[in-house]
Amino acid sequence: MTERLQLRRIGPGDKLQSYCRNARVRPENVRHPTGQLGRAFWLTLLAAVLTVACGPPPSPPQPDAATLRSLDTGQLIGFQNEKALVWRGIPYAEAPLGPLRWRSPRPPTPWEGTRPAIDFGAACSQLEIGTSTADLSTIEVGLEGSEDCLYLNIYAPKTLAAKLPTSPLKPVLVWIHGGGNSMGDARVYDGSNLAAAQDVLVVTLQYRLGIFGWFDHPALHGPDATPDDRSGNYGTLDLIRALGWVQNNIESFGGDPNRITIFGESAGGTDVLSLLASPRARGLFHGAIAQSGSTRTVSPTEARNGQHESEPGHRNSSTEILISLLINNDRAANRIEAGRIIDQMEATEIEEYLRGQSTLEMLQAVRGGSFGAMYDAPELIRDGHVLPKEDINEVLRTGHANSVPVILGTNREETKLFAAPSSPWITRLGPIPLWFNNQALYDLEAEYGSQLWKARGADGPARALVESGQAPVWVYRFDWDEEGSFLWLDFSELIGAGHGVEIPFVFGDFDFGPLTDTVFPETSRESAEDLSQKMMSFWGAFARGGDPNHEATDLPTWPAWQTNNEQFLRLDSEPDGGLSRSDETVSAEQILNKVASDPRIESDDVRCRLYAQMTRRGGPLTEEGYTRIAEGLCQGRPLADSL
């Protein structure tokens, strides 16, 4: 479904178009291996090329009797593609509509007969932003997906078609997509190649996003609400519900319920770390891989309070959303009047009002946004039930996390993907990069931002886990940066080993349609595919035995992270060093100290810009810390001016 409205607050730089918007290609037939976070930039820059790729939709797959499976809820039939057995759009929970909006997921309703598992279920509700005029003067905002979205997809080796039920059970990899926990779509991740190459089952799933996935308002906590319902962590509970479904049903597909590994990238990696910390997820998985994740969470105060309160909440807290709704619906002229109305409303009236808002009206109430359809809202709430009251790092450090083997990693140049369409060190035509006006500073900012991501998403959690002594940990850094060029743009310099670039290597899928030769040129394709095979082998071995070194291969030993020997594995192609060990570990404190003395930073403005970037989204610096650091160097430079 797609609904549309005009939002004047969005500027032309936020242009985001669906693949082949004016052609006949369905979203589920378009792959986007770099992940949903990057689509605003990629689509803006390459829309013309993508349009060339649009053609008639392929014929729908045909049901195959070899995929007939019986579940407690009814029979399913899927299909076969060239690589794998596939089942799409399997409901793992009841649709969270009406009274089930902002409630923990309930078991799915059984069906009669044989349910076709041929088509994907909908993506979960999110913003889709595009342009309505050729000169980009009018921006159109629409709703993509549906609140009826709690579906998963299964990819299995074709060998299981003929040998069930006598085949040995296969390990299972459950993928959690990224997108800032406010956008993203499991449909664009094809698990066929990974399933076939590693003889595993791959599960991809949708989960509630943004203000539908994490929303904590006391008025919703009525007498019939369970502790799960009151947590506000509905997206997290969706993941837990999906893992429970997998554990109870995957044996029917040939999967081993005792060898389930969760893996995810970006927000999906953050969700993996949150599941490590969640007591509600205990026993539902046996290994965890967090790719480019973080340990960022929010307090109930941040999730609930208005920004005007003595303890201010998030700008998209439940109170702030309620205020925006009242103003948008013309029930209040401004914030003050909206506050007075809220004070006079009973809890039941507030609940009825919130539940009565359409999906689009709810998204319309969100303030601000970034990188296309992604917006910043409270997520992963430390409610004390679904997630502990302590931050994730503390849970990992104290030994209260779910004790399973873990792989953690980031990419060497994470932040370049986000900087490319907005950096002041690039000259652009609208949002389209033209050339560097200062590549040294562009690279310097990416170096510090990416090191900070490594400190917070890999090295920091690894130290905490090893300190707890619970389970082994392995850490990687993905360094591949051999993209090609498009027109005047060298993607190896613009994006490099950027955020999400490792995903096609993990999934063994380098099909970018007409862009394949640009992203993976012939000169580096063979070495990229070789690195992909090695990475899939590590991921597969980990899924089988809880250790990337589980199987005797010709791959080098991946050293486990040790307190007195902090080492990680660099993942790169053979021409650039291949797989090699490194001890170049980092911490947030080290990075802050390095910024203070780095001779490459020639001006205080640039130094404060780096500090400002370390203040965003729960960085190591608070806003007060920003004004005090380096003996008050940045006090006269407001945060907004330094970004």
Image (cartoon, rainbow, N blue to C red):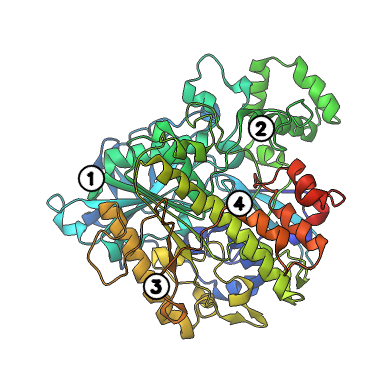
Residue pointed to by mark 2: 302
Of residues 192 and 528, which is closer to you in this image? 528
Q: Position of residue 246 (x, y in %)?
A: 32, 42
**Do callouts 2 and 4 mark residues in contact (Cβ within 8 Å)?**
no
Instruction: Name the secondary structure under disc 4.
Output: helix
Q: Position of residue 573 (x, y in %)?
A: 43, 76
Residue pointed to by mark 3: 531
Amino acid beneath label 1: Ser
Residue depicted at 61% across the width and 32% down the height: 299
Viewer-nearest of labels 2 and 4? 4
Tell me: 333 left or right of 309.
right
**Do callouts 1 and 2 mark residues in contact (Cβ within 8 Å)?**
no
Q: CA distance from mark 3 to mark 4?
A: 30 Å
Of residues 579 and 510, which is closer to you in this image? 579
Q: CA distance from mark 3 to mark 2?
A: 42 Å
Amino acid beneath label 3: Leu
